[in-house]
Amino acid sequence: MSTFRVNLNNSRQGMLDINPSTASQFSTSIQRTIYIEGPNRQHRKLSDGETFVDSNYWKRFAYPQMSLEDSFIEVVIDDGSAYSDIQSENNFPKVYHLTVSTETSYAENEIDIAEDTESYAHFVQITNKGSSSILVKLNGVESAIFELAGSETQVFNSGDLLVTKIAFDNNISGNTDCEVQVLCSIKNNNRS
């Protein structure tokens, strides 16, 4: 998700007025607030100077997508993801690299996709680059554990499973440390 700042105070739209309820130049007047349709046809109230985090849908109202005089959004932090009005196209990649040390369990080797991205992965590729087998637990579910042999890859394609968490266990006797790579395609939730 990217970070945006509302900028209704530009040369074409005029300067901030005094807020009649507070008589202060430094508080936002209701005249400096707009409602605009966001992702998923949900309306969002935007107040001048407000900062918010959301999908790159909002880049369409920022310069250079709009002229500097007409833009009313500033991009503060761009996560680089693309936005499409076609929901199925709204996703972005995420890569995790993890060293799963010997004699460690799931608690020490967890990737929390939901916490990191505020969404879920609809495509996941897990590669064990080590020579030993490790156990993989999906979504924190005890019945969703499988063994991934050394130098092997497991793929969950779109439509197979929605993945929010992956954990690894390397307590198998005689194992060595394993390097694990997890490639994900994350669904952009396009909050509004």
Image (cartoon, rainbow, N blue to C red):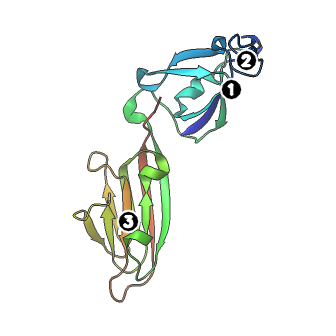
Identify which residue, 57 or 8, lies in the foreground: 8
Distance from disc 2 to disc 1, alpha carbons, whole Å, reads 9 Å
Identify which residue, 125 or 115, lies in the foreground: 115
Identify which residue, 43 or 94, lies in the foreground: 43
Q: Residue furthest bottom?
A: 174
Residue matched to label 1? 49
Few, some or many residues within 10 Å of mark 3 (<14, 14–19, 20+) = many
State the image coordinates of residue 174 (x, y, percent, origin top left). Answer: 36, 89
Q: Is residue 173 above or below residue 188?
A: below
* Image point (31%, 46%), residue name: 158
- Report helix, strand or loop for mark 2: loop
Q: Is residue 18 above or below residue 130?
A: above
* Image point (35%, 81%), residue name: 171
Specify the amino acid type for callout 3: Ala
Specify the amino acid type for callout 2: Asn
State the image coordinates of residue 184 (x, y, percent, origin top left). Answer: 42, 52
Instruction: Locate residue 23 relative to residue 3 in the image: left or right.
Output: right
* Image point (58%, 24%), residue name: 60
Specify the amino acid type for callout 1: Gly
Q: Residue furthest left?
A: 143
Residue matched to label 2? 9
Of label 3 and label 2, which has the lower sequence position? Answer: 2
- Report helix, strand or loop for mark 1: loop
State the image coordinates of residue 72 (x, y, percent, origin top left). Answer: 65, 20
The image quadrant that residue 4 belongs to is top right
Residue matched to label 3? 167
